[in-house]
């Protein structure tokens, strides 16, 4: 809020306590609101029931009614793991159900892993043949992606670099989109995608509704909003703080030489350890993974030198829990969103607080508790 005041922003800041809609207030205060109350139709509700969703999360209760009924652009402050894909995905799927194969929604994600996850999630919300969703990211075959686009799709999820490539090739047309969604906006800025995003904006339908989801609200996010969004509304969960909740944070003071044995001990004393071990360098990731492997633990390293095909196999094994321990660098782990992680271990501490918060936020999600060491 201070950032907004310092920027003399007069835009409406919407919190759960300040809601004028009685039902949305109820969702925030006692979680008694249901998905039916948000304006979703029977087909969408059937998809929600199949997914096993019971009650909307606070960001869903805030965003869904606005996307179904309003026309304004929106910035939503929401941490990863709070159900934000459903917050924008459910109303967009409901709105685009009867479209005819023209691209009507573009969702930008910072990493290929997040793009694939979001595409899969959007497809899981779809009851029936449409809207269709395809995913475009680097390291994958252009010909397969072009075939998907030519077959007709209403929703495209992709990374900025590959989206820009398709626009330059003329294989993607976003001049008729109704929705432009930037997901994980702060992470996208951290990864240096500002120029790509600006180029993509220039080729998009200027009348498209723009939705920006971000865990934090740095000045750069507001500059993008001022440049491209015109009038917009900001919504955020009441009580959002910069540190993830439900995480038991511990610290162990060790010599460098003691770290491998300490990590093994931590794994052994934990019930069903399933987590990410963060290192600063690629060589450290390989070293720690090798030590764990030699001691009989199901572990794998993930860093920038690993080929995309191998990377996808490693993540698939980790998601299915065939591998229980992922030893990763920050760059390689960007965008990995895997539920049920019990632990995050900072084998090496990061250089700044934001990276630490981002790391440990991979556990303790969606109401589950986690441990960070």
Image: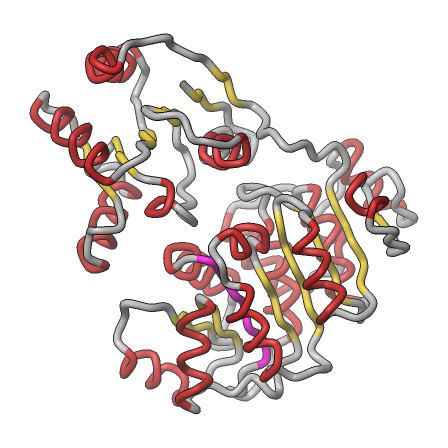
- Image quarter where the C terminus lies is top left
| Quadrant in which residue 33 is drawn | top right
Q: Give how far across and how far down residue 94 sits, in percent.
A: 64, 69
Q: Give the residue at x 23% y 52%.
A: 311
Q: In this view, does 79 lie to the left or right of 286?
A: right
Magenta segment boundaries in residue numbering: 104-110
Q: Give how far across and how far down residue 44 sits, in percent.
A: 61, 62
Q: Give the residue at x 19% y 28%.
A: 288
| Quadrant in which residue 55 is drawn | top right
Q: In this view, does 52 lie to the left or right of 177?
A: left
Q: Give the residue at x 85% y 44%.
A: 5
Q: How many marks?
A: 0
> Residue 105 colored magenta?
yes
Taking 221 as reference, is 70 above or below it? below
Q: In this view, does 267 lie to the left or right of 127?
A: left
Q: Give the residue at x 59% y 26%.
A: 245
> Residue 114 colored magenta?
no
Q: Give how far across and how far down residue 9 sits, in percent.
A: 86, 53
Name the outermost residue toward the left.
294
Q: Give how far across and how far down residue 59 sits, in percent.
A: 69, 46
């Amino acid at each position: 809020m201070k950032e907004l005041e310092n920027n003399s922003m007069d835009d409406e800041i919407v919190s759960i306590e300040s809601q004028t809609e009685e039902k949305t207030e109820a969702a925030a205060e006692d979680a008694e609101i249901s998905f039916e109350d948000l304006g979703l139709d029977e087909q969408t509700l059937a998809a929600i029931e199949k997914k096993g969703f019971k009650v909307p999360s606070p960001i869903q209760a805030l965003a869904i009614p606005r996307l179904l009924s309003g026309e304004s652009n929106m910035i939503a402050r929401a941490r990863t793991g709070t159900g934000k894909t459903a917050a924008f995905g459910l109303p967009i799927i409901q709105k685009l159900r009867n479209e005819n194969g023209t691209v009507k929604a573009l969702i930008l994600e910072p990493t290929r892993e997040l793009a694939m996850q979001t595409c899969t999630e959007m497809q899981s919300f779809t009851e029936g043949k449409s809207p269709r969703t395809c995913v475009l990211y680097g390291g994958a075959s252009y010909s397969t992606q072009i075939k998907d686009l030519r077959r007709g799709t209403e929703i495209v999820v992709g990374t900025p670099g590959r989206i820009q490539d398709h626009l330059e090739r003329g294989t993607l047309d976003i001049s008729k989109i109704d929705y432009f969604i930037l997901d994980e906006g702060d992470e996208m800025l951290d990864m240096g995608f500002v120029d790509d995003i600006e180029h993509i904006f220039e080729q998009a339908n200027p009348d498209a509704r723009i939705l920006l989801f971000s865990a934090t609200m740095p000045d750069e996010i507001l500059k993008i909003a001022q440049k491209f969004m015109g009038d917009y509304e900001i919504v955020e969960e009441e009580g959002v703080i910069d540190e993830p909740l439900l995480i038991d944070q511990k610290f162990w003071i060790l010599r460098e030489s003691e770290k491998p044995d300490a990590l093994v001990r931590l794994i052994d004393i934990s019930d069903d350890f399933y987590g990410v071990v963060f290192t600063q360098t690629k060589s450290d990731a390989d070293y720690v993974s090798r030590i764990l492997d030699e001691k009989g633990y199901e572990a794998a390293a993930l860093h920038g030198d690993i080929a995309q095909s191998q990377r996808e196999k490693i993540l698939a094994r980790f998601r299915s829990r065939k591998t229980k321990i992922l030893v990763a660098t920050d760059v390689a782990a960007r965008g990995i969103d895997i539920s049920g992680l019990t632990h995050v271990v900072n084998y090496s501490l990061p250089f700044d607080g934001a990276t630490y918060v981002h790391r440990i936020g991979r556990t303790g999600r969606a109401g589950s508790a986690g441990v960070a060491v």
